[in-house]
Amino acid sequence: MKKDFLPINGTDYVELYVGNAKQSALYYQYAFGYELVAYAGPETGLRDRASYVLKQDKIRLVLTSPLQENHPISDHIKKHGDGVKVLALWVDDAAQSFIETVTRGAVPYAEPKVMSDEHGEVVTASIRTYGETIHTFVERKNYKGVFLPGYKPRKSEYKPTPIGLKYIDHCVGNVGWGEMNKWVEFYEKVMGFSLLLTFDDKDISTEYSALMSKVVSNGNGYIKFPINEPAEGKKKSQIEEYLDFYNGPGVQHMAIATDDIVHTVSELRRRGVEFLEVPAVYYDDLLQRVGKIEEDLQPLKDLNILVDRDEEGYLLQIFTKPVQDRPTLFYEIIQRKGAKSFGKGNFKALFESIEREQALRGNL
């Protein structure tokens, strides 16, 4: 068995650049049940930006806004709107991870650096991936602080109730025409990932549009990145719409795992999160399609939760509408009952649902 030259312990954090981090932080606390745990900004000696760190179980979101218009983050937000900048990977040796990937062809974004405070030290290093997205390697084995040096613990008077979000299951990237294989090869060659699944335009197509997707995974399977590209269709695909409004490749959605999707989605709906809707007929022959499931069908139907099965088991999933006004980043809530796949049996119903939303926006 070949040695994994880039061992990854999991996702360390995901950082979003947003227009108003203070307000976004409140949205994620209220709607998604995250807890505010740390902050960095002018009050902590950081002069050019403000960052709020939110946590729920193993998930850490960092929301960052610039404080001046002539700042690189301002340029990023002007071009892309709110979106994911950093997919940070938790490693045992950040400098070594940087060397291993750069010698295999990764483009450096930030050289290894050591940050320290009274709680110890953290080493970080970053490489570029599709679009303006970066991977930051985070080594924190010698650190006991709340997040990273420079961040101070921060609590909110508002005490959100967690809604059962556990960890990031996978993160999906949208890339341009003909770029999917290039980026799959990047993950294979530069980061030692392997190809897990391939979906072509016959798997993922509707009457109007199509897309292609390949899923890459790291050695231990903790990190999974599906990569999508548009395919030829009669009308504009959801990937093209994303690329138009994000102005280039980027993270399309994050899938977040739960152990009780009915509870999680009930809470999200109650707090105002909007979801894509599939027609009621989807449920008419659901059990014939996927076989026996442990859940009652009625709550799934009421909440519009989708079900799919593979050789290992089944999964339940649902997708939010975009969480900002540009039709770009959205979230998937997923509960796995053994299934290792990504809901291929739901693609058609799901993409028809997305097309109905695209048509309402005038972008189909």
Image (cartoon, rainbow, N blue to C red):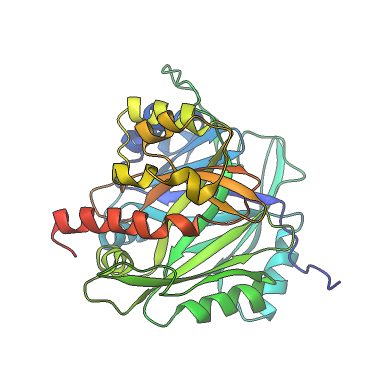
Q: Residue 62 placed where, x, y %? A: 48, 43
Residue 277 visible somewhere in the drawing = no
Asked whether residue 204 is in view, the answer is yes
The foreground one among 354 and 50 is: 354
Residue at image position (52%, 70%) is 128
Q: Residue at x 53, y 48 (%)?
A: 290
Report the side of 68 relative to 227 (left or right).
left
The residue that appears at 36% across and 53% down in the rendered structure is: 329
Q: Quadrant of residue 30?
A: top left
Residue at 50 percent of width and 55 percent of height: 343
Residue 252 image offset from top left, x and y in percent: 40, 58
Find residue 183 and report its horizontal and vertical position in percent: 52, 76
Q: Is residue 134 left or right of residue 322?
A: right
Instruction: Locate the N terminus by quadrant.
Output: bottom right
Q: Position of residue 320 (x, y in %)?
A: 36, 44
Farthest right residue in view: 1
Q: Nearer the viewer, residue 166 or 99?
A: 166
Q: Nearer the viewer, residue 218 or 196?
A: 196
Residue 83, placed above or below residue 299: below
Count numbered badges in the picture.
Answer: 0
Whether 68 is drawn above or below 293: the answer is below
Q: Quadrant of the C terminus?
A: bottom left
